[in-house]
């Protein structure tokens, strides 16, 4: 029993702490409120004027009813009161348009700016963040969560201010008519306040589960559609559809639990409002009969009570909007507060790396979340203009070394130098701007072939694009396509073969014209002869440039100035091709196997962490 109580207490504390953290996330919106203070002030002034005008309508009705009761009403007088109401209606419509433009427009500004800020921030985050955060989760933040923030900062704020002002003003007019009847009418309202607070406290946790499940659902759809060829090849359409249905059912169940709380607020609000109305009819009717108030007063009082019922019912809706908004805002803030593990020092200078000389000294590295070193004591000197080949088994550390040279992960001081500069002493862009990197996993955009080749050099002419495509042995295949270089290649280049995608990536790197070009197993999808031919054909582009090629095939690296053999995160041998064939048993056995069979992909592969 004690354990159960303690567990329940810890759960309550955790939930309360989570809610407090969510409400603190509102500070993310403070700059917007300060920046658009005049806009909001104008909007709220228009909103208040709408409420004030609405409050005058019951007074006009009161005078008309009193005249009718006394028998002193005339058609002309009633027409005059009607015209007053029509004029007020036009004024309400005009001011309502103004506050919608100003306040709801403000909420859209917040939504757009937050989306842009979040996207810009995501671009600053490094590989470690995206290894633990799914694309579906990011998409959910940019859609559902931002929509909830927009509703809370727009209609939520409007409804809250409107409800508070209208409620207090209507309460004041009711007191003016008859204080005793007012006390009787608002008697049940504390019950509504208590129930609203109790129910709204549950909205936070349930809405958070809904948003998290939506992230899972979105990521599943994205990953399934982006891998549709694999799904079909393995005949998994029914299985994926079943999994999607199960995730959808979970999402629906979470929404139903949320709707159970949300749907309870309005009926309770309506029930209590009707109870108040019943009390007014019973006691107000008696007062009217006894002459304590006039019939016009009773009609006006009921109208004010009706105006006050909206704030009562709106409070439940406002509580829901705010809970959804702060929950979503806390999820957005959690991403916005993430700092990249790879960050440059303050006032790190931007330098020009022109020679392409690279020196690595006693470099060891461990991936986040792992317990074993991926690289151990790497020492390497690559003079400017050198052609370096790197070979090794899967998991040898080849890709990790490339990622570190490309500044995708942080390294300690005094480990990697470019042209004599410690990479930590200069800006990150200084290093990345010196490297044309073709990663192991080729990334293409759902755009034209020309756009993908010129991605890093958008000002390139079509002649320059065609020239590098020819060097990468892909020009003829592109020219044979119906739209040529304007052919759209689909998501991740789905319309192209693996070899075509890799050669487009090579062309993109060549077009950058940078002092260092690094190809991490970037031609594994083409045959050995084509790979060798491509490396020879791009030789003119590599003159005077440092070239690092990771390959699981040895023959294309025969022209390298030096070849490094890696195993278990270490450099176990290095030297020219001929020397390694003579003295290194691993290298020579792989070379003989590949040259005798023509293809030895299974012996030495390039895939790794």
Image (cartoon, rainbow, N blue to C red):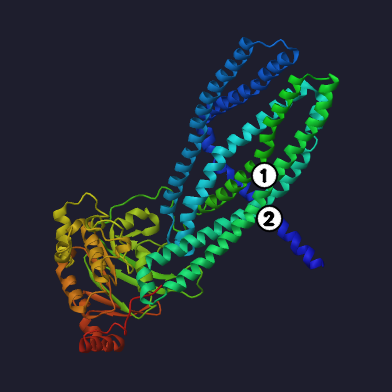
Label 1 – label 2 distance at C-alpha: 25 Å
Whether tag 1 and tag 2 are in contact, CB under 8 A, the answer is: no
The image position of residue 287, as x and y in percent, is: 83, 24
The image position of residue 607, as x and y in percent, is: 36, 75
Q: From this viewpoint, is residue 339 visible?
A: no
The image position of residue 261, as x and y in percent, is: 67, 51
Label 2 sits on residue? 15
**Residue at horizontal 24%, vertical 75%?**
562
Is residue 560 rendered to the left or right of residue 293? Answer: left
Judge whether 443 appears above or below 189 on screen.
below
Residue 266: numbered disc? 1
Q: Which of 240 and 128 is in front in this view?
A: 240
Q: From this viewpoint, is residue 116 visible?
A: yes
Q: Disc 1 on helix, strand or loop?
A: helix
Q: How many marks?
A: 2
The image position of residue 338, as x and y in percent, is: 51, 54
Query: Closer to the observer: label 1 or label 2?
Result: 1
């Amino acid at each position: 029993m004690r354990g159960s109580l303690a567990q329940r207490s810890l759960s309550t504390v955790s939930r309360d702490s989570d809610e407090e953290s969510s409400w603190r996330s509102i500070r993310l919106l403070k700059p917007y409120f300060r920046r658009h203070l005049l806009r909001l002030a104008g909007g709220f002034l228009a909103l208040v004027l709408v409420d004030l005008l609405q409050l005058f309508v019951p007074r006009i009705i009161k005078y008309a009813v009193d005249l009718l009761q006394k028998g002193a009403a005339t058609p002309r007088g009633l027409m005059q009161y009607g015209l007053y109401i029509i004029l007020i209606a036009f004024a309400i419509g005009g001011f309502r348009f103004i506050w919608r433009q100003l306040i709801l427009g403000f909420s859209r500004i917040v939504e757009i700016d937050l989306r842009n800020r979040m996207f810009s921030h995501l671009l600053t985050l490094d590989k470690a963040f995206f290894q633990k955060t799914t694309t579906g989760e990011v998409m959910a933040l940019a859609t559902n969560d931002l929509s909830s923030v927009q509703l809370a900062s727009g209609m939520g704020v409007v409804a809250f201010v409107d409800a508070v002002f209208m409620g207090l003003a209507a309460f004041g007019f009711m007191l003016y008519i008859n204080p005793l009847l007012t006390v009787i009418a608002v008697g049940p309202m504390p019950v509504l306040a208590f129930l609203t607070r109790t129910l709204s406290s549950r909205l936070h946790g349930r809405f958070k589960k809904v948003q998290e499940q939506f992230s899972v659902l979105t990521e599943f759809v994205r990953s399934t559609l982006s891998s549709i060829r694999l799904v079909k090849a393995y005949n998994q359409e029914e299985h994926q559809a079943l999994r999607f249905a199960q995730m959808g059912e979970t999402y629906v169940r979470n929404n139903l639990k949320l709707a159970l709380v949300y749907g309870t607020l309005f009926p309770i609000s309506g029930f209590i409002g009707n109870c108040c109305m019943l009390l007014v009819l019973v006691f107000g009717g008696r007062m009217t009969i006894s002459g304590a108030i006039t019939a016009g007063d009773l009609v006006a009082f009921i109208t004010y009570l009706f105006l006050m019922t909206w704030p009562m019912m709106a409070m439940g809706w406002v509580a829901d909007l705010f809970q959804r908004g702060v929950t979503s805002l806390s999820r957005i803030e959690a991403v916005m507060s993430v700092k990249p593990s790879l960050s440059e020092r303050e006032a790190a200078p931007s330098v020009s790396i022109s020679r392409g000389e690279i020196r690595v000294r006693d470099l060891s590295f461990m991936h986040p979340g792992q317990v074993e070193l991926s690289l151990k004591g790497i020492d390497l000197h690559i003079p400017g203009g050198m052609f370096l080949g790197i070979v090794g088994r899967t998991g040898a550390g080849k890709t990790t070394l490339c990622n570190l040279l490309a500044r995708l992960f942080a390294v300690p001081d005094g480990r990697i130098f470019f042209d004599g500069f410690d990479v930590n002493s200069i800006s990150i862009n200084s290093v990345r701007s010196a490297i044309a990197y073709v990663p192991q996993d080729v990334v293409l955009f759902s755009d034209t072939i020309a756009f993908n080749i010129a991605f890093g050099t958008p000002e390139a002419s079509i002649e320059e694009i065609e020239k590098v495509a020819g060097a990468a042995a892909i020009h003829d295949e592109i020219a044979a396509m119906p739209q040529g270089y304007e052919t759209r290649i689909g998501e991740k280049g789905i319309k192209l073969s693996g070899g075509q995608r890799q050669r487009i990536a090579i062309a993109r790197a060549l077009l950058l014209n940078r002092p260092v070009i690094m190809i991490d197993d970037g031609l594994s999808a083409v045959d050995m002869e084509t790979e060798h031919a491509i490396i020879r054909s791009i030789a003119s582009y590599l003159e005077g440039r440092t070239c690092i090629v990771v390959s699981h095939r040895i023959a294309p690296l025969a022209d390298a100035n030096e070849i490094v053999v890696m195993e278990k995160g270490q450099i176990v041998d290095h030297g020219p091709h001929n020397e390694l064939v003579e003295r290194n048993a691993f290298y020579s056995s792989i070379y003989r196997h590949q040259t005798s069979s023509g293809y030895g992909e299974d012996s030495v592969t390039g895939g790794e962490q």
